[in-house]
Amino acid sequence: MPTKKRLVQGNEACAEGALAAGVRFFAGYPITPSTEIAEILAEKLPYYGGHFLQMEDEIAAMAAVIGASLTGVKSLTATSGPGFSLKQENIGYAIMTEVPCVIVDVQRGGPSTGLPTAPSQGDVMQARWGTHGAHPIIALSPASVKETFDLTVKAVNFSERFRTAVIILLDEVIGHMRESVELPAHSEVQIVNRKKPDVPPEKYLPYKPDEDGIPPMANFGEGYRYHVTGLSHDESGFPTGSPKLTKELILRLHDKIEKYKDEITITEEYMIEDAEVLIFCYGCIARPAKRAVKEARAAGKRVGMLRTATIWPFPDKALLKAAKNARAVIVPEMNMGQLLEEVQKYLGCRIRVEAVDKVDGELITPGEILDKVEEVL
C-alpha cells in the first residue's frame, strides 16, 4: 500500500490497520454500522494469505476467532451493539484462557435494535463489565479516521503482548466518516508478536508466567499440546478448585494489565494548563469538545479538554493531572453518563462534575457543551 493521501472511511482504516498489524483471520456476521470492515477484509485477506469466514451468528464468530488465534494467527472480529452482547461469553473465555484477539464494536443507538444507522457511545460499560466475573480489559476509542488505523494496530499489538482480548470502541460517526489521510505503508508499521516458549514441549507450562507476568504462548500445530479451559486452572492449564490457585490466577490476569497501565493509556491534552473548566471526552465527541474549547477561549473563558483514547483501564492519572487546577469537569457522552461516575469516583467531591448526555442519535454540539460551561462558571 503506497504512502499517499487517500479519502478513507473509518471502517476502512480499521480494516487497513488490522492488515498492517498482521491480522490474517476474520470471522464475523454482518451488522450495521460495522459491515464495511467485514466486506473489506473479505476482499483483501486472501491477498495476504489470510482467511475470512462469515459465521452463522456472533457467538460462533467469536469462538472462531479464539480458535484461529490458538493456532498462532492474529485474529479479529467486528460487530455492533446487539452482536457485541452475544460475543460476551466468549470474550470472557478469551480473557480466562489468555488468547490474543481483537473485537471491534462500532457502536450504534440502543437498547435492542435501537438506531442501527445512528451514533452512540452506549457500550462503554458493556466493554468493561459485559462478560461476567472479575476480569481485566483493554478498550480503545479513536476520534478520527487516522487514529482508527493507529489504534487498530495498537489493539492487535496489545492483544499479542499481554495475551488478552482487546476491544476497539468505534462509533457510527467515526466508522462512517471519510477523511483525507495518509496511511503508512505496512512495512513502516511497528508490530508485536506473542512470546514463544523457549523450552521443549514436555517441559512447557502454558500458564506459567515469565517475570513480566505474561506466559509464553505456544501455537497449536507446532508440537505443543496443552489443555485450554474456561475453568479456573493451574499453570498446566488443567482445572483446579484450589482457592489459592484461583486467587493467584485472577490476580495475575489483572496485574499483567495494571502493571503496564501507563503504557496502555493514550490521551490528548488541549489547553489544560490554566483551565478552570475541563472537558473530559472520548471518541467522536472530541471534535465538538475541541470546538467548544476554542470558542470559550475566544470569549476569555479558561476551558481545556482531556480526550482519552484509552477507555479501559480508566486513565485516572491523566484525569487527576488535567483537573488539578479545575473548578469543574464536564463529561459529554452519547449515553446516560457511563463514564461520568468513573470521573466522579476519582475526583470525589473536590471538583464539580457535570454531564452533557444525549441519546437521540444526534451528535452533541459545541453549543450544548458551551451551555454547560456557562452553567458551571
Image (spheres, grey):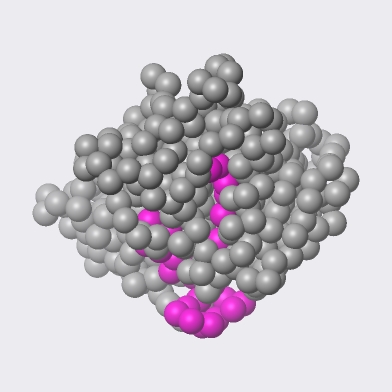
Counting from the top left corner in percent of width and height, residue 245 is at 27, 37
Foreground residue, 303 or 199?
A: 199
Q: Is residue 15 left or right of residue 114?
A: right
The stretch of residues the image draws in magenta is 99-128
Residue 116 lies in the magenta stretch = yes
Of all residues, the one furthest to the front in this rendering is: 202
Q: Position of residue 256 (x, y in %)?
A: 38, 33
Whether residue 184 is visible = yes
Outermost residue toward the left in this view: 349
Residue at (48, 69) in percent of width and height:
85
Q: Is residue 48 left or right of residue 31?
A: right
For the N terminus, give its image quadrant. Answer: top right
Residue 295: image location, x then y, percent: 44, 57
Q: Is residue 174 left or right of residue 222?
A: left
In front of the other: 253 or 170? 253
Above-or-below relation of 99 to 349: above
Q: Residue furthest right?
A: 47
Magenta run includes residue 59: no
Quarter containing the C terminus: bottom left
